[in-house]
Structure formats: C-alpha cells, structure tokens
Amino acid sequence: MDVKILGVGCSVCQSMYNTVTQIVAREHIGSEVEYVTDLDMILSYGVLSTPALVINERVVMQGFRGARKIEQTMREACQI
C-alpha cells in the first residue's frame, strides 16, 4: 500500500503525518508514510487545501479531521 501525506510543513500537516504513521505502525500495515511537501506534486493531485491523505494514489481526505476520522477513512480505503 502506498500512503502519502501532502502538506506544506505546518503543524496541522505534521499532526496528520504523525497520526497516520501511528496507525500504520499499530495496524502492522507494512508501508512507509511519505510526507510530500513539493507544491508542484501536491497540485498534481488536484489538492487545494492541505493536509491531504493519499492512499494508492487516490486522495481520500483533505484537511485534518482528527485521529478517529483518519483511521475510519484508512479502513474504508484499504480494508485494514
């Protein structure tokens, strides 16, 4: 599974990265979480607000909505 956080380096983006990394480790997903800060790459996903969660090259969440919502979204996106 390919997991990316798209963000500009702010504290909210970092919080999403930390939360996703913890979920990946806890659920033994066996994937590294990539933190993408390159603006051109972020825009290539059609994302206009960050942070954004990308799973298998599909944007599944924009904006930080808390750990529970992130975990629920990840479960739905990849059946963990």
Image (cartoon, rainbow, N blue to C red):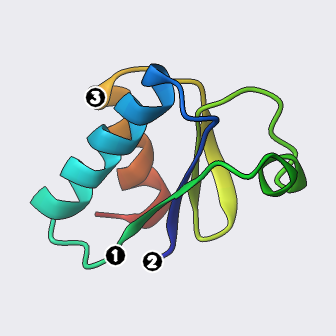
Q: In this view, does 63 lie above or below 23?
A: above
Circles 3 and 2: CB atoms closer than 8 Å: no
Horizontal and vertical percent position of residue 10: 53, 25
Q: Distance between the residues labelled 1 and 3?
A: 20 Å
Q: In this view, does 41 lie above or below 39?
A: below
Amino acid carrying label 2: it is Met
In this rendering, would 40 be left or right of 63? right
In this rendering, would 59 be left or right of 63? right
Q: Name the residue under label 3.
A: 68
Q: Is residue 14 above or below residue 32?
A: above
Badge 1 marks a residue whose secondary structure is: loop
Circles 1 and 3: CB atoms closer than 8 Å: no
Q: Mark 1 points at which residue?
A: 31
Badge 2 marks a residue whose secondary structure is: loop
Horizontal and vertical percent position of residue 67: 29, 29
Which residue corresponds to the image point at 59% horizontal and 71% vertical from the top-left?
Answer: 56
Circles 2 and 1: CB atoms closer than 8 Å: yes
Which residue corresponds to the image point at 45% horizontal and 77% vertical from the top-left?
Answer: 1
Q: Name the residue under label 2.
A: 1
Q: Which of marks 1 and 3 is nearer the N terminus?
A: 1
Residues packed near mark 3 inside 10 Å, few (<14), some (14 to 19) or many (20 plus): few
Amino acid carrying label 3: it is Arg
Residues packed near mark 2 inside 10 Å, few (<14), some (14 to 19) or many (20 plus): few
